[in-house]
Image (cartoon, grey):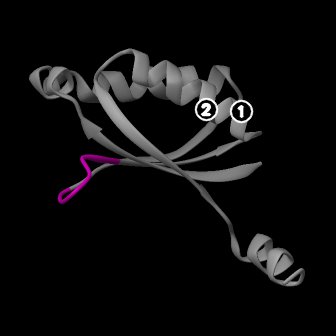
Amino acid sequence: MANYVVLGNFTEQGIRAVKETARRAKAFREAAASMGVKLREVCWTLGHYDIVITMEAPSDEVVESLMMKVGSLGNMKTQTLRAFGESEIEAILSKV
């Protein structure tokens, strides 16, 4: 499975209902699991981003579908990054 990092910020709608953020994270975890995505960690953060999520997924297409589903709810704007582990980057660098 591939690794991903999601950087998120609350929308105006999301911050108005911020007291629901833990419940929404649980619902996100359940939705992700139903699509074969394993959430490793959901962290609420200080600084430029409000939330950072690390997860594993079977494909970019599955992640894109999940993030579109989340975005359609209107509580978060996200940026998703494909992350490469040590062994993956070594394989990539062997082709350079």
User: Which label number is shown at residue 17?
Assistant: none
Among the 4 quarters of the image, the one containing residue 74 = top left
Label 1: element kind: helix
Residue at the (68%, 23%) spot, across then down: 35
**Number of marks drawn:** 2
Label 2, residues with CA under 10 Å away: few <14, some 14-19, many ≥20: few
Residue at the (79%, 75%) spot, across then down: 87
Amino acid type at circle 1 is: Glu
Residue annotated with mark 2: 64
For the residue pair 36 and 70, the one nearer the viewer reads as 70
Would you say the residues marked 2 and 1 are in contact, meaning their CB atoms lie under 8 Å apart? yes
Query: On the picture, is 13 further left or further right than 27?
Result: left
From this view, report whether residue 95 is shown above or below residue 73. Answer: below
Label 1, residues with CA under 10 Å away: few <14, some 14-19, many ≥20: few
Residue annotated with mark 1: 61
Query: On the picture, is 91 further left or further right than 17?
Result: right
Query: On the picture, is 73 further left or further right than 36?
Result: left
Residue at the (71%, 32%) spot, across then down: 61
Among the 4 quarters of the image, the one containing residue 47 = bottom left
For the residue pair 76 and 39, the one nearer the viewer reads as 76
Q: What is the quadrant of the C terminus in the image?
A: bottom right
Whole-number angstrom distance, CA of label 2 to CA of label 1: 5 Å
Residue extending farthest to the top is: 73
Q: Horizontal and vertical percent for residue 22? A: 28, 29
- What span is in magenta? 46-51
